[in-house]
Structures are given as structure tokens and as C-alpha cells.
Image (tube, helix red, strand yellow):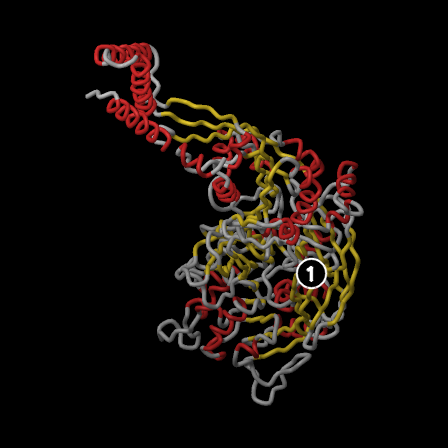
């Protein structure tokens, strides 16, 4: 159509497709119903009226002129009618166009994980179609690579009769080309599926959509809820089809859970070091476990072993042998490598420290006087090859050579010197002669260094010690002795409950025997013969004693091994305690209220020697092995995330101690910069020798756990070293903390929108899930002609012709 014709008809901009369309004339203001009848009647009346006017007015003109004037007037009225009815040109055309398909592929960090795909026929075929040699090769590739290959395999079919728009998204969607999709990497720190769907749909509002293809593992952790967005899309008829990338089990990962070894071992003793590995989704894969040690110099290899994972979830324990050659501390480091791609390599390391100590127990005996018990004990300890023994006789004169395998010329004067020993035996010592510093030295020796302390009561100094008065000065002098260190002993002697001298003398007329408690009968200290029957005979035959120092009672956490055999020797707490033992911090203390075990030599020398050897071993071995507690503290992880439940466990080192080692523990947990909070350790009912406590770590930071035996005052004792454990809590990682495929979310999104979820093994079914390809649409062009130049021109032309004709016919 020429520009002139378009101008003449008043067409403003005719589309190119109009030439192949259907052209129609319509009246925009055409009356309907009764109004139409009325307007037709009015039009006829107008024609009749015009004819009537001209018939009366034009009697003087010819009939042909009369008809011509009537026709012109009718044409003028027709133009006016066309203008009033709003004449409109309508051009329509129907055509088919391609629909739009939106493809959103997840590029967040979780898509960089690998999954333990099962070995089955369906996945073998899938791996082959995706270009992998086998399922094992597919396991080595991350989720994004699998999704990219699946998309490449169906993209051509999806684009047939459709326009495909590609987007990558993490926390927001980004339009990508096909080449950019292939090279995309999983780097996003958040996944906002809902926001990505909202943005993509908004960009294509008003366009015919075939649907949305979502390739993701479903781990939406930011932005709008994708279920709500999918529901809105469903109302608009836009289905969302999700390709579920990943597995329900989650990615494969191997974690070096722990190095299990004794914290303290003797030099030149071969010990076993176990490396515990936990694996998930690693079936069919192998790794290399290397154990290294460092002692003063650099790292050296202890051994290495290849490990193969068989089951879906496997726990493997590898054992290595280690023989330390020198005293000191050894650091152990284990590393598992050559595993291929996995969830994280941060947990492929573990460390452990081991203290190497000498094999002999070092004993220091301090005696207030050279009693028979002291002399026989001194000789027995010198003969014992398992001991390094030193003796200090307080009443010896200058120049006296003290007895011992390593004789000393003076007593220790500070902590460092005293802590060279593992056991201190105080045999009725004169504490005033030792000096005021020894109160703190003894408390720290037991409570901090974990040393063993044996106190043997005697007739010269013990009563004054418990009274806090110097025996030389007597009670009337008021000169006090610092006996605050007595808190480490397992017994309590309340003032006013001691026997008078007359009662003591009365009690020494006849010998008394030990009465072992059930705990004493079962304790190795009193095992004189491996045969139980023979051992009972020996205990019954032991010669009796004539003197003991009466104490009020044993402390609540103490274990009483022997009580007085005479039923008259009792108080409101029962028969007098003769031998009690308990832990004070990491150390042990023993109280003997009698000083005549040497009489047992009358039956046989080995009963006396064996009793003291076993007693010294009991109280001193912990110090020789590093001053450790009878339990170890551990957590179920090395590193936690905020919101995790932290499990703290105390586990008895020696199975023989069992429940007793962890029966009464209390502790506190402290986050750096905050006040500590109590932590209750509860024994595990079905696991003797184990106690647990748990809490939720709501804040990130370094946490410290401190645990003490229940016999330490609630306010604590500065001389007691607590068992400690440190661990770290890190901020939750949105992408890697929940690495499994969230199939449930994808199914909710698909169901809400009227779509479906397709597994990776069925990825070829994706094109069939979208039903819409080309869509039909009607194009329409409308333009008003009532104000076209041709209408106005015709009106003016008709009016002008009528005027000229009337003038020529000499009409008014």
C-alpha cells in the first residue's frame, strides 16, 4: 500500500504482516438491539425528510437536478453517520510461534560435590550416555559436571520449536550462553532457588512459556521459598521440571576420625597406634594412610598402609607399631591421601601427642624417726629394682649418709625438684622441720603434677599435725602448724574426737587385725596370693597391730580398704578407718592409720615387700605416666558448626578402674571471652567407664572444657589441675553443611507447579516432560477511519457540489 493511500485512509502505521491478513471494516459505535432499530428508523426518516424538502423546494428544477441534489445531501449525511459510528479498519492474522523454555542450572558450591552413585545397570547406561567410561568415573565428577553433560544431551531436542533461555544461578540468576553454561563453575556461597525462579519468570512475563527446567541438588538456603514461587507459576500454567542432581546419601567423604594410642608409654616399650578412618560413599575406592612422628627433630615416617573401602558406609581401623627410644614427648600425625574427589580434605588429618617416660617409679620417703617400720621399708625399697628410691630421715645428724638407690643430701625446695619423684611417702613427719613451703608443694605435687602421696600415721607427730599444733610446744603453746595440705588426704579428723592417752593405752593391750571392706578384698593391694582361698588364709594369718591413729571418717569420694578389727574401736561413722585411698585431682593419696606392717614379715618377707610394692605402684604409676587422670576427655568431632550438638566424653583409661574413674565428675565449659557455665558429666548406663555431657554450640569460637573429680570443692582448688579439652566451633557453612540431595524440596516445587522431578538416570525423559512447543496466536491491527482525510474530504466535496449546483439552479 502506497503512502498516499495510507494517508488518504488515515492509517497511521500499518504492520508488515497486514498484507497477508484479513481486512475488515467495523463500526466502533454501532448501536445494538432496539437502539439499532431506532437509528435505522431515524436514518430512513432523514432520507424521507430530505426528499420531502427538495420536492417542495425544487418544483422549478428538472427531476434529474432534483435527484442529484437529494443524492448529494444523502451522501453528506452518510459521511456524518460514518463519523458518528466511528468507522474502524481491522486487520487480523493467525500464526504459530515457538514457545519459551527457561533453563536454570545451579552453580552454587554444593554443586561442586561428588556423589557415590550406585553400581547398577541404569546408572551404567547413564554414565555411558553422559560420556563417562563407567560409574566409577562418574563418581569422580562433581554434580555440576554431571548436570552440564545431561543438559548438553537434551538441549537440541528442547530447542526444537522453542526458544531456550539459559541461566546460571547461586544467590541470583545470570543469563548465560550455551558456551558459558558448559564452562560454568560451582562457586556460589548461597543457593536461592526461589529468587532465581522469580527473576527468570519476571523477565519473560507476557511471553508464551513452555515451562522451566531446573537443574539442582535442591539445597535452597537463601531467598524466597521456592514452593511459593512454584505455586504462582502453576497458576499461570508454567510447569517446573527439576533434574535432581546428586544422591540421597550425599557426597563421598573419608574422615580421619582419630589416632588412638596411650597418652603415656614407657621408653623402649613397643606400643600400638591405631588410626581410625570413617568413610561414606567411598565404596570401591582406595586411599593411602601415612603415620608420622616427631620427637625434637623433624617428622619421620612410622609406616604407611593402603586402605580399600568396600561398604557404603565403612569404618576402618589400621594398626601401626611404635617403639620409642628416648624419654620425652612424641607428636604423631596421620594423613589419608590419594582418595580422589571428596566432600572436603580438611578432615583428612589427625594428630596425637604421646609422652615417653622412664620405666622406674621414683620414690621419696620422709620419716620423722627411724622406727622399725621405716627401717624395714627402707631396706625393701632399696632392693626393689623397679624403683628409684631416696630416703630422708629427719632425726639423722650432720654427716649421716641417707639411704637410697640415689641418695640425696637435701630435700627438694621447689616444685621442679619435688616433681622429679612419682611418690612421696610421709612417715609421721615433723612438718615444722620441713618448712612452711611444703604445704603448697605437697598440694601441687598431688593436685597439679598428679603425684602419689602416702601418709603413714605415727605416735610422735601425727596428732599434733591434725591438731595444727607443734608437738614440742604442746596444745597450750598456741604455736600452729600449717596443715592445710591435709585436704588432699582421703580422711577427716574432726577436733575433739581423738581418744585420750588412757584410751590409746587401753587399746594397745591386745593386738588387732585388719578387717577388709569388700573393696579392700577385691583390691590388688591385698592380693598376697593368686589363689583366692590361699589369699584369704594369708589375710587371716597376718600378725596383728597394737597401735593406730583414729580419724573421724573417710571423705565421701574416698575408698576405704580396711577398718579396725576390734568392734569397740568405732564412732558414729562406723569402725575406725585403717587404710583409705582416693584421687585428688590427677593424683592419688593413701592414708594408713597404723605403722606396723613390718610385723607381716614374721609370716613371710614377701607379704610386707609385696604390699608396699603394690601400694607404691598404685599411687605412683599415674605420675610416672605423665601425671594423667584415670580418664581421657574427648569430643565426637574436632571441629563443629554453629548449631551442632557437642558431645563430651570421659573414658576410663584402665578397664580395671571402670565406673570408679568417671563416677563423680563435674566440669565447666567456657567460650573465649565469656564466663564459664557448668557442665554435668553423667555416666553412660550401658558403657561402664564412660561418662558424657552434651550441649548445643550456638556461637562460633574456641571452647575450653575443664573437668574435675567431685571431691574437689565447688569453688575449686588452685593446686588442682583440671582435665582439659579444647575444640573449635566454626560458623555454619550453608553449602557444605547439608550436602545431600534435597529431593523432597524438588518434588514440592514440581508438584506445586504441575511439573515433575527427573532423576539423573532418566535425564533423557526431560524433553517429553514439556508438552508445549509452538503456540498459535492472533495478530490484530485496528485503525480508526472516521477521521480519515477521505471522509472529511468527501464531506467537504459533497457540500461544495451541492452549493454549486444550488447556485447554478438559482436556489437559495
Q: Is residue 501 rendered to the left or right of residue 348?
A: left
Q: In what element is the residue under mark 1?
A: loop
Identify which residue, 212 or 538, lies in the foreground: 212
Residue name at image x 60 percent, y 76 percent = 420
Find the residue positioned furthest to the bottom.
Answer: 399
- Residue 486 % position (x, y): 47, 66
Q: Give the percent coordinates (x, y) of residue 551.
A: 48, 59
Identified at 56% across, 64% down, the residue is 587
Which of the pair 715/643 is nearer the observer?
Answer: 643
Q: How many marks?
A: 1
View extreme (left): residue = 812
In the picture, the quarter occupied by the C terminus is: top left
- Residue 290: which quarter of the image? bottom right
Q: Is residue 716 left or right of residue 652?
A: left
Whether residue 661 is visible? no
Task: Locate residue 196, reporting x and y percent.
Answer: 51, 44
The residue where tag 1 is placed is 261
Q: Is residue 123 above or below residue 604?
A: above
Q: Residues within 10 Å of mark 1 (few under 14, many from 20)?
A: some
Query: Going by the image, does 329 lie left or right of 573?
Result: right
Choose between 248 and 798: the one closer to the eye. 798
How far across and how far down the image is residue 591, in percent?
A: 55, 63
- Asked whether, in this view, residue 291 is left or right of residue 660, the answer is right
Is residue 325 visible in the rendered image? The answer is yes
**On the image, which quarter does residue 304 sit in?**
bottom right
Amino acid at each position: 500500500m502506497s503512502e498516499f493511500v495510507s494517508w488518504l485512509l488515515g492509517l497511521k502505521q500499518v504492520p508488515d504482516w497486514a498484507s497477508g491478513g484479513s481486512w475488515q471494516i467495523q463500526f466502533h459505535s454501532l448501536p445494538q438491539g432496539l437502539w439499532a432499530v431506532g437509528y435505522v428508523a431515524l436514518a430512513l426518516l432523514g432520507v424521507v425528510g430530505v426528499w420531502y424538502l427538495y420536492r417542495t423546494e425544487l418544483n422549478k428544477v428538472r427531476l434529474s437536478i432534483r435527484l442529484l441534489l437529494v443524492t448529494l445531501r444523502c451522501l453528506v449525511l452518510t459521511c456524518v453517520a460514518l463519523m458518528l459510528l466511528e468507522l474502524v479498519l481491522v486487520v487480523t492474522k493467525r500464526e504459530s510461534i515457538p514457545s519459551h523454555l527457561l533453563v536454570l542450572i545451579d552453580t552454587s558450591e554444593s554443586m561442586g560435590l561428588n556423589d557415590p552413585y550406585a553400581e547398577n545397570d541404569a546408572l551404567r547406561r547413564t554414565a555411558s550416555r553422559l560420556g563417562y567410561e563407567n560409574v566409577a568415573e562418574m563418581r569422580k565428577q562433581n554434580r555440576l559436571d554431571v548436570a552440564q553433560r545431561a543438559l548438553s544431551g537434551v538441549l537440541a531436542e528442547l530447542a526444537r520449536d522453542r526458544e531456550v533461555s539459559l541461566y546460571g544461578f547461586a544467590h541470583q540468576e545470570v543469563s548465560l550462553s550455551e558456551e558459558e553454561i558448559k564452562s560454568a563453575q560451582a562457586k556460589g556461597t548461597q543457593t536461592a532457588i526461589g529468587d532465581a525462579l522469580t527473576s527468570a519468570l519476571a523477565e519473560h512475563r507476557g511471553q508464551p512459556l513452555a515451562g522451566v527446567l531446573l537443574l539442582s541438588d535442591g539445597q535452597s538456603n537463601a531467598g524466597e521459598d521456592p514452593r511459593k514461587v512454584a505455586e504462582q507459576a502453576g497458576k499461570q500454567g508454567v510447569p517446573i521440571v527439576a533434574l535432581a542432581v546428586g544422591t540421597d546419601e550425599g557426597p563421598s567423604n573419608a574422615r580421619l576420625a582419630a589416632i588412638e594410642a596411650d597418652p603415656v608409654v614407657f621408653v623402649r616399650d613397643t606400643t600400638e597406634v591405631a588410626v581410625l578412618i570413617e568413610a561414606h560413599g567411598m565404596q570401591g575406592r582406595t586411599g593411602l594412610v601415612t603415620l608420622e612422628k616427631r620427637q625434637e627433630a623433624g617428622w619421620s615416617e612410622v609406616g604407611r598402609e593402603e586402605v580399600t573401602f568396600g561398604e557404603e558406609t565403612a569404618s576402618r581401623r589400621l594398626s601401626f607399631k611404635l617403639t620409642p627410644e628416648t624419654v620425652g614427648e612424641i607428636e604423631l600425625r596421620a594423613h589419608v591421601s590419594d582418595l580422589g574427589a571428596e566432600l572436603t580434605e580438611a578432615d583428612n588429618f589427625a594428630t596425637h601427642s604421646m609422652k615417653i617416660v622412664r620405666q622406674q617409679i621414683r620414690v621419696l620417703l620422709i620419716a620423722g624417726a627411724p622406727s622399725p617400720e621405716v627401717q624395714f621399708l627402707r631396706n625393701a625399697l632399696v632392693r626393689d629394682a623397679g624403683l628409684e628410691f631416696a630416703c630422708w630421715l629427719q632425726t639423722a645428724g650432720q654427716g649421716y649418709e641417707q639411704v637410697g638407690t640415689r641418695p640425696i643430701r637435701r630435700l627438694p625446695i621447689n616444685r621442679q625438684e619435688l616433681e622429679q619423684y612419682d611418690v612421696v611417702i610421709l612417715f609421721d613427719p615433723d612438718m615444722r622441720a620441713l618448712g612452711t613451703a611444703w604445704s603448697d608443694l605437697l598440694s601441687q605435687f598431688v593436685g597439679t603434677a598428679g603425684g602419689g602421696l602416702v601418709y603413714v600415721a605415727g605416735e610422735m607427730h601425727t596428732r599434733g599435725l591434725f591438731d595444727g599444733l607443734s608437738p614440742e610446744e604442746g596444745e597450750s603453746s598456741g604455736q600452729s602448724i600449717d596443715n592445710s595440705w591435709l585436704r588432699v588426704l582421703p580422711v577427716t579428723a574432726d577436733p575433739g574426737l581423738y581418744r585420750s592417752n588412757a584410751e590409746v593405752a587401753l587399746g594397745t593391750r591386745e593386738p588387732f587385725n585388719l578387717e577388709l571392706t569388700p573393696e579392700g578384698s577385691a583390691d590388688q593391694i591385698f592380693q598376697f596370693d593368686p589363689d583366692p582361698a590361699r589369699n584369704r588364709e594369708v589375710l587371716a594369718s597376718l600378725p596383728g597391730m597394737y597401735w593406730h591413729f583414729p580419724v573421724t571418717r573417710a571423705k565421701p569420694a574416698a575408698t576405704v580398704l580396711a577398718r579396725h578389727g576390734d568392734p569397740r574401736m568405732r564412732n558414729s561413722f562406723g569402725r575406725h578407718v585403717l587404710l583409705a585411698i582416693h584421687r585428688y585431682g590427677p593424683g592419688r593419696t593413701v592414708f594408713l592409720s597404723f605403722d606396723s606392717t613390718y610385723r607381716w614379715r614374721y609370716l613371710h618377707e614377701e607379704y610386707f615387700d609385696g604390699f608396699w610394692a603394690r601400694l607404691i605402684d598404685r599411687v605412683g604409676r599415674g605420675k610416672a605416666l605423665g601425671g594423667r587422670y584415670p580418664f581421657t576427655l574427648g569430643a565426637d568431632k574436632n571441629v563443629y558448626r554453629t548449631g551442632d550438638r557437642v558431645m563430651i566424653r570421659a573414658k576410663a583409661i584402665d578397664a580395671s578402674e571402670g565406673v570408679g574413674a568417671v563416677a563423680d565428675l563435674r566440669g565447666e565449659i567456657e567460650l573465649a571471652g565469656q564466663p564459664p557455665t557448668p557442665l554435668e558429666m553423667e555416666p553412660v548406663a550401658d558403657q561402664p567407664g564412660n561418662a558424657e555431657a552434651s550441649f548445643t554450640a550456638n556461637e562460633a569460637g574456641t571452647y575450653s572444657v575443664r573437668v574435675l573429680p567431685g571431691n574437689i570443692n565447688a569453688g575449686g582448688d588452685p593446686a588442682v589441675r583440671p582435665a582439659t579439652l579444647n575444640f573449635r566451633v566454626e560458623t555454619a557453612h550453608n553449602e557444605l553443611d547439608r550436602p545431600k540431595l534435597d529431593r523432597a524440596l524438588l518434588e514440592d516445587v514440581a508438584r506445586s507447579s504441575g511439573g515433575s522431578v527427573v532423576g539423573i538416570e532418566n535425564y533423557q525423559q526431560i524433553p517429553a516432560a514439556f508438552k508445549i512447543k509452538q503456540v498459535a496466536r492472533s495478530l490484530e491491527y485496528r485503525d480508526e477511519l472516521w477521521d480519515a482525510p477521505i471522509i472529511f474530504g468527501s464531506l467537504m466535496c459533497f457540500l461544495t457540489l451541492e452549493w454549486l449546483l444550488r447556485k447554478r439552479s438559482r436556489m437559495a
